[in-house]
Image (cartoon, rainbow, N blue to C red):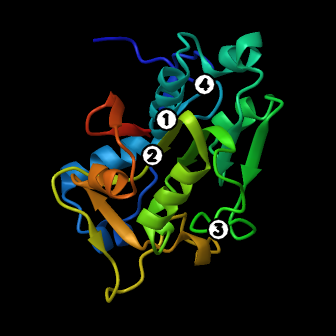
Amino acid sequence: MTQLTCSVCGGDAFKDVPVIWPALIAEWGLSKEEAAYIDRQQGRICTACGANLRIVALGRAVLAACGHKGTLREMVADPATQTLRVLDLNGVEGISQAMQALPFYRRADYPEVDAQALPYPGGSFDLVIHSDTLEHIPRPIVALEQCRRVLAAGGRLCFTVPTVVQRLSRSREGLPPSYHGAPGDDLHDFRVETEFGADVWTYVLRAGFEQVTINHVEFPTATAMTAW
């Protein structure tokens, strides 16, 4: 088996921390197998930088999109990367801290910036990233359309979204509210609007992107998508 290394820092030591809780498992209707791989996705953490497997997968997608063979920390130190214009929607643990060293990095957090109405001219960025954000947006295809609009020619969108691969996506409209985030948090911004499944890639194409690829650290545990 290939040794797992962190795409952010290059670390190879990981620890497991339980993340999802019984009420969320019940709301999502997860099987024992599904709950186990989602818990691993969110709770297997690099001991050096704190990136979990979801973030490691996103980091690999970003590195591939930018044509870089090292870690993200090495990539942002590369002189060839200094002109990269990055839009980071809502932040990604480890990745945001690395990317903010770039001169043209921009962080945009909800509610100050709504992904369904990005306040930037078309073609403003070479790379747009977001992680586990799309499921909380009422109109996910509109948000993806906005990401496409603000990308320059040749630009890439890299993102993750919780995906249960054994089922199709469904809206939670009309269902009891379900929230991500730890119990006891202020959960207003963590309400789940869409539960994504095996057809998640169709949302990307419906938003007008012409191509989409999937990067994975472990399947089905941790995947990230790249679109252009």
Mark 4: few, some, or many residues within 10 Å (few <14, many ≥20)?
Answer: many
Instruction: Report the residue at 45% width, 46% height from top.
Output: 160
For disc 1, the marked residue is: 58
Name the residue nearer the viewer: 27 or 114.
114
Work out how far the residue at label 4 is from the one at label 2, CA to CA, in angstroms: 15 Å
- Indicate which disc residue 114 carries: 3
The secondary structure type at the circle numbered 2 is strand
Work out how far the residue at label 3 is from the one at label 4, CA to CA, in angstroms: 27 Å
Q: Earlier in the sequence, mark 3 or mark 4?
A: 4
Q: Residue furthest right?
A: 103
For disc 4, the marked residue is: 8
Instruction: Report the residue at 64% width, 68% height from top.
Output: 114
Residue 32 screen position, x and y as percent: 20, 54
Residue 123 screen position, x and y as percent: 64, 45
Circle 4/circle 2 CB separation < 8 Å: no
Instruction: Report the residue at 42% width, 83% height from top.
Output: 177
- Indicate which disc residue 156 carries: none
